[in-house]
Amino acid sequence: MTKVMVTGGCGFIGSHIVDKLLNEGYQVVVVDNLSSGQLMNVQYNQVTFFNCDISSRSFEQVIFATRPDFIIHQADPVRPDRIGYTEDHFLGSINVIRIAAKYRVKKLIFASSGEIYGEPRYLPIDSKHMTDPHTTEGISKLTNELYLKHLANVHQLNYTILRYSHVYGPREHVKPNPGVVNVFLDKLAKNQACPVYGDGEQTRDFVFVEDVARANLLAIKKGSQTTLNISSGISTSTHQLLQVIQNASGRNLTTMYKHERHEEIKHLLFDYQEAKRELGWEPEYDLEKGIQTTLASYQHKISLP
């Protein structure tokens, strides 16, 4: 039976990947330090679980003991301070990449981010777009991508890099750095005003977590030595997002306008056609279906009409 390790497997995206791996009959090893992930997110009795920090020496011992065929690297620190994030993410990912090369795993699937592109020169952004990240996450992800490609050349490490757009869905963290969908649903549950920055016409590309998880599974067998965008390919403004949530919930949302955030990129939209060609992947959830599914996971918090 093929063995797949998922780092951050108890977290938001990682736990959905674990669910799909189990459904497909893979043997699953989950590594998570539970700093933000929760054991309740995975079917604990069906996985081999290690409470372990990927930047620690003990992580190599876990690899040695389990010998996974594939590693899907999703672990991502949620520390709000920029310096802490950079240190945690860079060192942890470097350790994963180094050990994957050392133990000659069949493939490393690396979660990256659309943040690495920075201010777009054109839309939609494809994977050939220049990289000029302006955020801590983007800088850290790009640095790790470069290190991964370097080690892949030196040690013949097989890899696929998946650059996610704005992922949303059930199990997303509310703190400390939640996505806007989660923020709005949390405010809806608490009957509080939704914060809107600037004029509310800034646009983002929202991709549902189940679609992201499916892309990772496809990358196990396809897409060698490649970098791909995983996105919806649809541009949605903050005002449009609020309307979709309002329609799905049957509730009126109140808003609270705030000053535009410093250096916020106004419009983002990503091209996933390369993922379609190389993985046979394309999104199955539109925003309406994804929001309805996410709302269902909030049923215990939100009183819907």
Image (cartoon, rainbow, N blue to C red):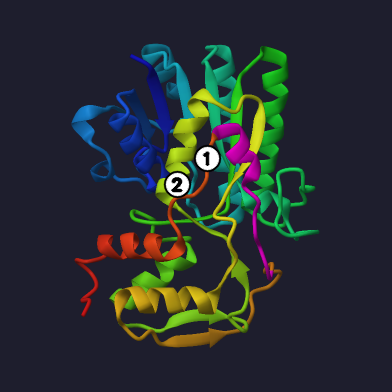
Residue behind mark 2: 211
Estimate how packed mark 2 is, as few (under 14), some (14 to 19) or many (20 or more) residues with alpha carbons within 10 Å.
many
- Any magenta on residue 50? no
Tell me the kind of residue under disc 2: Asp
Residue 112 figure quarter:
top right
Residue behind mark 1: 281
Query: Residue at (48%, 62%) from the top-left corner?
Result: 179
Question: What is the C-alpha distance between the residues marked 2 and 1?
Answer: 9 Å
Query: Residue at (29%, 74%) from the top-left corner?
Result: 189
Mark 2 or mark 1, whichever is nearer to me: 1
Residue 260 figure quarter:
bottom right
Q: What stretch of residues is rendered in magenta?
A: 266-279
Q: Secondary structure at mark 2?
A: helix
Looking at the picture, how far across and down is residue 169, in whole percent? 39, 56
Note whether residue 50 is visible: no
Residue sitting nearer the eye, 246 or 150: 246
Tell me the kind of residue under disc 1: Trp
Query: Residue at (57%, 13%) from the top-left corner?
Result: 102
Marks 1 and 2: in contact by CB < 8 Å? yes
